[in-house]
Image: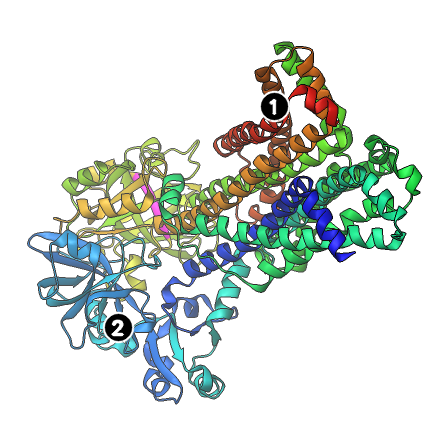
Amino acid sequence: MWSVTLQLMKKSLRMLIPAGIAIVIGTAFIASTFLFGNAMNNSLSSQLLASFGQANYTVAANSNASPEDQRGRAAADFHLDAMRAIDGVDGVRADARANIEASKAGKHISAVAIGGANDAKLLPVTVSQGRQPKTSNEIVLPSGTAQQLGAGVGDAVEISGQASTIPDGPDGPGASLSGETARHMQVVGLSDDPNGAFAYYGGAAIVNDADLAALQGLPSFDTVQVPGLYLDVNPAQADAALARIRPLLPQNFTVQSRQAASETALKQMNGGGMSPVTVFLMIFGVIAMLVAALVIANTFQVLVAQRRRTFALLRTIGAKRGQIYRSVILEAMLLGLVSSLIGIGAGIGIMALAVRSDALGKALTGASTHASLVITAPVIAVPLAFGVLMTVLASLGSARASTKVTPLEALRPMELSEAASTGYHLRTASGALITVAGVALAAFSVVRMHGYISAGEPTQGSGANGYSIILLIAIAGCVAVFLGLALTAASWLPKLMKGAGTLVSWAGPSAKIANANVQKNPRRVAATGLALLIGVTLVSTIATGAASSKETMNNALNTRYSVDLVATGYGLNQRSASKISAVRGISHTLYAPVATGIVEESGHKYSTLLVGVADAGKLQSVMHANLGGVQIAGKRALFPKYSALSGKAMDLKDTATFRAGDGGGAAHVGSETGSGKNAGKALSLSVDQSDFRQVSDNYDAVVFVDDTLFASDTLTTQSHILLASVDPHATNLVDTVQKAQAALGSDSGVSLTGPIAKRISWEGIVNTMMTLLIGLLAVAVLIALIGVANTLSLSVIERTRESATLRAIGMTRSQLRRSLSVEALLIALVSGLAGIALGTLFGWLGSYIVFSLYGDIALPFDWKTNGIVLLVAAVAALLASVFPARRALKTAPVEALAEA
């Protein structure tokens, strides 16, 4: 029967193409979801580990380390020379850095400097021109910084350690990490930052270890604070080398591989090791193949029904039932194998275009991404296995049907509707039960998550078993809901289309015929609608989740970091503030006088920075915090609720005493501030508290007071501070920071810092996910285009006599073509709207379960993406109707009536 099967396939090629396309769609979808997860994890890992360079091992504080150890230990504690001497250790780089200011010809740029490495692979930046520093007073500048300064390789620049605390003294830098004056250094190279390790500064400068220590005002590199190390270890000698490295490490510091560090970082982002995005994609990929099986089964039923005469003749000439059965199964296997391979290739091609189209990513997200196409064994094996298996399973019913009739019975035509109705009620009832169970599971997960958060359990770590169970319940609920809706689709989806078709039918006879055709075979329409529903639901789910994550994390960053940008330094003045205010993307600024000291209350002492503001409204314009009801007037001051140094609550009474010049932030950096007229002054302040954080992490508290206290000389102005808020919608965050730094280029002694760097990092992660979403959107387009065309093609084949009759009684070509277009639009738009509604609900549920760990959850509706998806579905439907219409119009009415 092998040759007979091949001949039958060749003869029925036109009928097999729609079935093959259904398999291509399903396998392409599964391959794309695997590739999506691989690319996303690879991209996130690259961003999270950007500071590694090409190091294959890292040393860092473990989870048991104290906050002090987390910030770092002295370089001498790591015994770097002994570590470098170990066989198998090809390179060691200490993760040390210093804030610097680079100056040339009256231009001044803030930057960050890191130490060099004998092994260039360990550098987080690449030296694109020149070489690394070999001796003191040599420096590699970031390309962007060099361009702003007008410096090149061989030029001399002035480099000074930049103050990193607030404020500076009236006569120069105060509590600065640097205690030295500017030094002349020669530019020996230029660096690029391809992975965005130092996106805030546009890259990092490189100096030798001695210069790095000097820029921090320290006598030697041994005293530089180092939070960790990066190692290049020979894989062949790794076990022996690591065994000798571990005894050299300070207590509570461990060494782990790059892969382990990457997995740890991803686990922390994914809630204890489970990636909700990957799980959702995997589940939707499997569902896509299950729905494709419905389309395949439907196609094979039509195929077998049309071959009944051929099977009867084969039985007449001696073919056995088993041979006929095996012939259909063999045909399904061949079809599944070839179509699956094509689908896998299509999925790889789609995602390759998505991850490599950086220009498209910039256009849609406003930023470049660094996604890569990562092909693993599951990308090929899983879709191939599913494609062949599901095709064979989908053909079993048709194969059995081909053997249950006698040759004489097979010569009679069989109504397809009889087979299609088998098991309808059982499937509907079971689907309804599964849907109800899914809704119950989803509701239960929400209730459990609410209790989990209310009990404060997220502080124990998102990897706790309780959270994992809640996440699994939520995923199971979504899967059950979708499977239930898929099983009952033949009931509810055609009814939705019937309702929409009733309205459309008023448009004329073509629309009426299209509405009647949609209702003629509800099972096939439901299968096609589900194929489109899969893609739209997935895209809408991910788009909603991405929008929710961005808004939720922005809200969380607003809580943890209340001010976007902070400018300080002895060179800061009103002119500098005006320059910053003029930068596009800076929405508001606040230039204010400051004083340092301590606040005493109930036996507690808090290092404090006092900032003078006109009123709470002016402060609110630059601060991401709820200041409703706050008053800053007279001696009434606004205090934070938590210490920036310890993180503990500041339980203050109604009044607190501020004493100027008694340490301030200086106690934490080894210098003194607050000298002069301010020293020793005591001021009683009325306390008002609000939850704002990280205006400065060098003091327990940043306190806002009435600026008239400075004007009246009740407080002596030591220096000034500039607070700025950034509008993330006005321009790209990286561009805003770079333009702000460039605006201060002529002002020496001004440091521009702020938590916006964390916003930049998070924005990059979300942009990566959104750019990869383009690939899934392309798959959804493929489903819309080919899935609808599949249904219309089968419908045209079945309705050959009907179409011919309509043409014979006067229906024009344009009317017939228009009826097919309306039919395609009904299927696409109704399924698309249902997918958007379902995907939004899934996205909201997933966002609540995942992102409520980080702060107040935002549940937005992504109008832009959902609108694009619906528009694409409509356009794809119109395109899908073109070829079936040509097929219907190609045959003359008389000829079609004769053949039917």
- Quarter of the rendering containing residue 590: top left
Residue 82 located within the stretch drawn in magenta = no
**Viewer can see residue 325:** yes
Q: Nearer the viewer, residue 112 or 433?
A: 433
Disc 2 is placed on an element classified as loop
Instruction: Name the residue located 88 percent from the left edge and 38 percent from the top edge.
Output: 410
User: Who's the residue at 28% across and 47% down the image?
Assistant: 566
Given residues 351 and 682, the one toward you in this image is 351
Residue 208 image-quadrant placement: bottom left
Amino acid type of the residue tagged 1 in the rendering: Leu
Where residue 168 appears, x then y in whole percent? 20, 54
Q: Is residue 900 left or right of residue 823?
A: right
Q: Secondary structure at mark 1?
A: helix
The span picked out in magenta is 701-705
- Disc 2 residue type (three-letter): Gly
Residues packed near mark 2 inside 10 Å, few (<14), some (14 to 19) or many (20 plus): many
